[in-house]
Image (tube, helix red, strand yellow):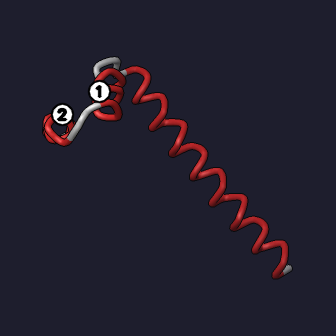
């Protein structure tokens, strides 16, 4: 019974993380403004990162 309960706990944790990451990815792809800003940050320096951080608030 203890092993079964631990497996159930692990399964619940995995499902919660999968649902959480799925909703985050879905939100990112629906918000089209987010992707070009992220690309600019990865290619540019701290100035764009600060403006991106302000937009995320």
Q: Name the residue under label 2.
A: 48
Quadrant in which the C terminus appears: top left
Which residue is depicted at the point 18% across and 33% down?
Answer: 48
The answer to which image quadrant residue 14 occupies is bottom right
Which residue is depicted at the point 48% across and 33% down?
Answer: 25
Task: Check the image and report above or below for 37 versus 32.
Answer: below
Residue 26 appears at what percent x and percent y?
47, 28
Residue 28 appears at what percent x and percent y?
40, 29
Local crowd size for mark 2, using a 10 Å CA cut-off: few (<14), some (14–19), many (≥20): some
Quadrant in which the N terminus appears: bottom right
From the viewer's perspective, tell me whether residue 47 is left or right of residue 28: left
From the viewer's perspective, tell me whether residue 3 is left or right of residue 28: right
Q: Which of marks 1 and 2 is nearer the N terminus?
A: 1
Label 1 sits on a secondary structure element that is helix
Looking at the image, how many numbered discs can be counted on the residues? Answer: 2
Task: Check the image and report above or below for 34 versus 20.
Answer: above
Which residue is depicted at the point 15% across and 41% down?
Answer: 50
Q: Report, in whole angstroms, how far the alpha carbon at label 1 lies from the one at label 2.
A: 7 Å
From the viewer's perspective, tell me whether residue 56 is left or right of residue 34: left
Q: Do tag 1 and tag 2 residues touch (Cβ < 8 Å)?
A: yes
Which label number is shown at residue 40?
1
Which residue is depicted at the point 28% across and 20% down?
Answer: 33
């Amino acid at each position: 019974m203890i092993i079964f309960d631990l497996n159930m706990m692990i399964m619940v944790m995995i499902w919660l993380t999968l649902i959480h990451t799925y909703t985050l990815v879905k939100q990112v792809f629906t918000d089209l403004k987010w992707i070009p800003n992220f690309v600019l940050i990865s290619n540019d320096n701290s100035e764009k990162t600060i403006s991106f951080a302000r937009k995320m608030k």
